[in-house]
Amino acid sequence: MKTYKVNKVDGNHIKINGRGDHPLWEKAIVLNDFLSPWHFESVGDIEFRALHDGDSLFVSYKVNDTHLHIDSTDDSKESVNNSDRIELFLRSDRHLNPYYCLEIDPLSRIQDFIARPNKEFDFSWDWPKKDIAIQSYIAPTYFCVEVALSMASLKKFELIQTDGTMEAGIYRAKYNQQQNGQFEPTWITWVDPQTSSPDFHIASSFGKLKLDNY
């Protein structure tokens, strides 16, 4: 299983602003080996970083993209589902019963839901508002999304193992306009799930986050 080390920083010092420019992000390992096993085109540069301070898990995505597709119908989860976005799935074990999905677009809008095997999704579920913070930023050639999750919520959902590891899926959905004018997603992932068609809702698409000094 692919593993990413989440370095620890001093508590109460990192502040997310959506730009990914806080000096402490320099202490994070850059994860950029993303791919789309089902498409031939380049997936573009994507940088994922994660840090923790013992009280919160911080993640940052920087995605090179000059042609964003954003469904601006409203702020519903359905609009997020039709937009370019980053995705973070977290599970307690490989049985996926349950697992938690965070899908966030460049406007900081979130589609969060709890899921179970065979793509049983409950979109009425939300990550507790007091336990999550989201900031984003759009530049001419890229966008950034930063997320802070409380360790209390991660423990409540049994997402941190006794050895300080978490099992996570790290993904991106990029919508491209087709010849018929419709927009279709290119699915991009950190871990190749070895499936014939795109599928993130499967145990083999997850990797491991190792919390340093946890």
Image (cartoon, rainbow, N blue to C red):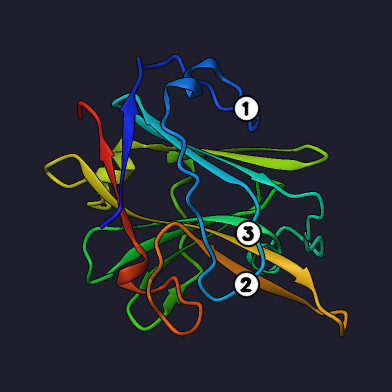
Residue at the spot 53% in from the left edge and 21% down from the top edge: 15
Q: Nearer the viewer, mark 3 or mark 2?
A: 2
Closer to us: 28 or 12: 28
Residue 43's mark? 3
Proximity of marks 3 and 1: CB atoms separated by less than 8 Å: no
Quarter of the image with the C terminus in it: top left
Q: Is residue 159 left or right of residue 162?
A: right
Q: Nearer the viewer, mark 3 or mark 1?
A: 3
Gap in angstroms between the C-alphas marked 1 and 2 = 34 Å
Residue 28 drawn at (x, y percent):
42, 28
Identify the image quadrant of residue 27. top left
Proximity of marks 1 and 2: CB atoms separated by less than 8 Å: no
Vertical order, 14 against 176 (above or below)? above
- Tell me the amino acid under the disc marked 3: Val
Tell me if mark 1 has few (under 14), some (14-19) or many (20+) residues whose alpha carbon lies within 10 angstroms of its own. some
Residue at the spot 50% in from the left edge and 83% down from the top edge: 197
Identify residue for label 1: 17
Residue 169 drawn at (x, y percent):
40, 58
- Tell me the amino acid under the disc marked 2: Phe
**Circle 3 SS class:** loop
Tell me if mark 2 has few (under 14), some (14-19) or many (20+) residues whose alpha carbon lies within 10 angstroms of its own. few
Identify residue for label 2: 40
Closer to us: 81 or 185: 185
**Circle 2 SS class:** loop
- Tell me the amino acid under the disc marked 1: Asn
Residue at the spot 71% in from the left edge and 63% down from the top edge: 83
Gap in angstroms between the C-alphas marked 3 and 2 = 9 Å
Residue 191's mark? none
Vertical order, 136 against 65 (above or below)? above
